[in-house]
Amino acid sequence: MLRIASLLSRRFNRLAFHREMGDDPFMSVSASTRVYRIRLPVRLWHWTNALAVVILLMSGMMIFNAHPRLYWGAYGADFDHAWLVIGNRGAHGYLAVGGIEVPTTGVLGFAMNTAQAFPPLVTIPSRYSLAIARLWHFAFAWIMVIGWISFAIYSFISRHLWRDLALNRKEMRLSALWRDIADHARLRFHPALHYNPLQKLAYLGVLGLALPLMILTGLAMSPAMDAAWPWLLVLFDGRQSARSVHFLVAAGLALFIVVHLAMVLLAGPVNELRAIVTGWYRLPGDRTRP
């Protein structure tokens, strides 16, 4: 009798939950546990921004090849002290950071028989051309900026920011964050209707910090924008500092992309790709909570 009562109780709770979710098509759950997880504007922005960021990274590496040295402050030239250098001595490439030099032959400095900081395999264009790289970079920078502004407006109007990305009180507890970190470290992934705390923090970091920094530092490197908005140089303590911050944030975005793709593969690429292409996501059983 207790077993039957337990089964009936679970069935009733499931039906009640489905009725509750049925009021919102975004969170509707079908009998086959398929849920509409990602709305169309989010999916469009994801793919547009992904394309823009990849091309910006590749064209940016070609632009960096023109002067593969980074400085802090307002000035930077070959004889000034650089905190980062990617160079070569003949056929031997190296990376120097803060006076510490690491050999990087075959990866950076000298690779594919090319004496450039970044090899042709990862740059746009594949042959050295600062002018063409700048054209690609500026064109897709506008795509990224317009897309970011449009997505920010959509996130506020639709409440996507608060509903899907903001951490709730439970998720902001250190114990919850630590448990999520431990699960990721053990490669334990729990399919759920909502993003987990680490996903939310990563996405908020990209949307609210990394992309705005990329935009502002990019503007600060433009002499025309510096003349129109001199506060940009004050904000970043000089054009060379802005270039350094731009490079570091770009490296962070590249790392984010690598980790993001690894998580997709580990969590189940078919299910994850289905969600970001069609919006529909499959949950195991009744697991509609993170």
Image (cartoon, helix red, strand yellow):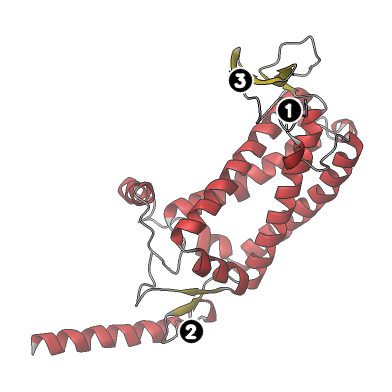
Q: Earlier in the sequence, mark 2 or mark 1?
A: 2
Q: Amino acid at mark 3?
A: Pro
Q: Describe the element under mark 3 as helix, strand or loop.
A: strand
Marks 3 and 1, how far apart at CA = 12 Å
Query: Is residue 92 rendered to the left or right of residue 76?
Result: left
Residue 56, position as x, y percentages in the image: 75, 45
- Residue depicted at 82% across the width and 44% down the height: 137
Q: Which mark is residue 288?
A: none
* Number of disc labels: 3
Q: Which residue is mark 2?
A: 23
Local secondary structure at mark 2: loop
The amino acid type found where label 2 is placed reads Asp
Q: Provide the residue designation for mark 3.
A: 103
* Relative vertical location of residue 102 with respect to residue 11 in this rendering, above or below: above
Kindly tell me whether residue 215 is visible in this rendering.
no
Of badges 3 and 1, the one in the foreground is: 3
Left or right of 272? Residue 81 is right
Amino acid type at image mark 1 = Ala
In the figure, is residue 290 to the left or right of 10?
A: right
Residue at 61% x, 19% y is 97
Vertical relation: 163 (above or below) 207: below
Q: Residue at x 20, y 86 (%)?
A: 7
Q: Is residue 211 left or right of residue 285?
A: right
Q: Residue furthest left?
A: 1
Q: Secondary structure at mark 1?
A: loop
Q: Nearer the viewer, mark 2 or mark 1?
A: 1
Residue under numbered circle 1: 117
**Marks 3 and 2 in Cβ contact (< 8 Å):** no
Q: Which of 166 and 76 lies nearest the eye of the viewer? A: 76
- Which of the 4 quarters of the picture holds residue 76? top right
Crowding near the residue tagged with mark 3, few <14, some 14–19, many ≥20 C-alpha atoms within 10 Å: some
**Residue 52 percent location from the top left of the image:** 74, 52
